Amino acid sequence: MPTATVILPPMLREKTEQQARVDIEGATMREILENLEQRFPGLRFHLCYETGELRPYVNIFIEQANIRYLQGLDTPVMAGARIRVLPSVAGG
């Protein structure tokens, strides 16, 4: 199974033992998220609804491409890919 590097924002690092980068296996983005949840229970809640769908304020990029414009959570992940998780930030 391919291994990718997931880069997490500071706000989620408390769920990953302060790790900014995590190497994780998965052939699709859905598998990557499932494996992240197994390794760091509770992380998925911040990224997805209970139905498994990505929360609207969470953006995930594989290399430079937003998965929302590809195949969503079914987007294939190549070995060595860099995945960035970027929650939207709003302010006033």
Image (tube, helix red, strand yellow):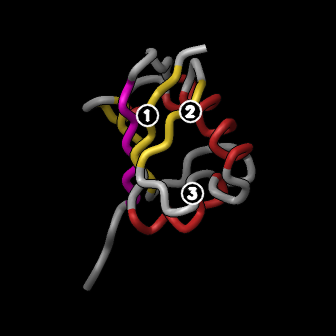
Q: Give the extent of the magenta segment.
A: 81-87
Look at mark 1 in the image and give the residue it sits on.
5
- Identified at 30% across, 29% down, the residue is 63
Q: Secondary structure at mark 2?
A: strand
Q: Position of residue 83 (x, y in %)?
A: 40, 36
As displayed, is residue 80 above or below residue 12?
above
In depth, the one of 61 and 83 nearer the eye is 83
- Identified at 56% across, 22% down, the residue is 28
Magenta highlight on residue 41: no
Give the amino acid at mark 3.
Answer: Thr
Badge 2: how crowded within 10 Å, few (<14), some, or many (20+)? some
Look at mark 2 in the image and give the residue it sits on.
24
As displayed, is residue 25 above or below residue 83?
above
Quadrant placement of the C terminus: bottom left
Q: Position of residue 80 (x, y in %)?
A: 40, 21
Look at mark 3 in the image and give the residue it sits on.
16
Mark 1 or 2 closer to N-term?
A: 1
Q: Secondary structure at mark 1?
A: strand
Q: Secondary structure at mark 3?
A: helix
Give the amino acid at mark 2.
Answer: Ile
Q: Are marks 1 and 2 in contact (CB under 8 Å)?
A: yes
Tell me the distance, in whole angstroms, between the alpha carbons under discs 2 and 3.
12 Å
- Identified at 47% across, 20% down, the residue is 77
Tell me the distance, in whole angstroms, between the alpha carbons under discs 1 and 3.
13 Å
Mark 2 or 3 closer to N-term?
A: 3
Mark 1 or 3 closer to N-term?
A: 1
Give the amino acid at mark 1.
Answer: Thr
Q: Position of residue 47 (x, y in %)?
A: 56, 54
